[in-house]
Image (cartoon, coloured by chain):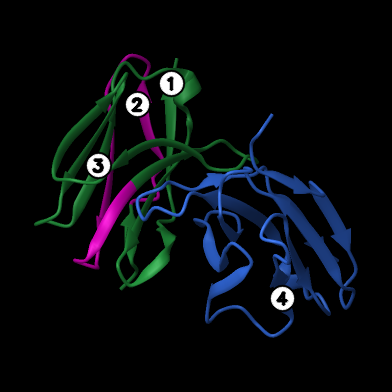
Amino acid sequence: QKEVEQNSGPLSVPEGAIASLNCTYSDRVSQSFFWYRQYSGKSPELIMSIYSNGDKEDGRFTAQLNKASQYVSLLIRDSQPSDSATYLCALTSRRANNLFFGTGTRLTVIP
Amino acid sequence: DTGVSQDPRHKITKRGQNVTFRCDPISEHNRLYWYRQTLGQGPEFLTYFQNEAQLEKSRLLSDRFSAERPKGSFSTLEIQRTEQGDSAMYLCASSLQQGNSPLHFGNGTRLTVT
């Protein structure tokens, strides 16, 4: 079983809609969770981090973490065409000092 | 700009040649990571340094790969006797030492082995 699982998509939403991206993980001792955005041909860019259960909001982005269900999600409100990118879920665990990434979900926002 | 810097941006080499990439991390970051990413996949961990010490290496990292960070500042990643399967984007990232610190990535070096 992979450390981090994401639906590879593609996920298409109309402009102005809410995009919902989901991620599950296998290691219960996972500690810190991150969402990165990656445009085609570019490097990953950090957009959100979350460390405790519940919701964390930053502008149009909301990260949600449920450690009991081993589930983390990212909501993008009022989606814009510029949000079209691949979104990578990543986490750290007590077992290692590096970041484990999912395969990413490709999001397309249709004007 | 004080972000993570990688050089070169692109490298095309013939199979069997050696290549070396350089990474300059954010100056106050003492952790430095190398990742590899292929099309349609997430970044895959290769190795990580804390200051000049290489603390972790992926089991997937073959003996042809070696990384150094001699003075705890910049790092180099060398691939010897390149193979076509080494073609990928090589990403460097840095972070502070605290466990929750996020990684900040450079623009990557795209390697093509012909």
Q: Are marks 2 and 1 in contact (CB under 8 Å)?
A: yes
Using a 10 Å C-alpha cutoff, classify the residue at mark 1 as few (fewer than 14 neighbours), some (14 to 19) or many (20 or more). some
Q: Which residue is mark 3?
A: A73
- According to the rendering, which colour does chain B have? blue
- Element type where label 2 sits in the image: strand
Q: Which residue is mark 4?
A: B66
- Element type where label 4 sits in the image: strand
- According to the rendering, which colour does chain A have? green
Above or below, comparing residue A99 to residue B15 in the picture: above
- Element type where label 1 sits in the image: strand
Q: Which mark is nearer the camera, 4 or 3?
A: 4
Give the residue type at disc 2. Answer: Val
Q: Looking at the figure, which quarter contains the C terminus of chain A? A: top left
Indicate yes or no whether the magenta region holds residue A25: yes
Q: Which residue is mark 2?
A: A13
Which quarter of the figure has residue A64? top left
Circles 3 and 2 on the same chain: yes
- Does residue A35 appear to the left or right of B106 in the view shown? left
Magenta span of residues: A7-33
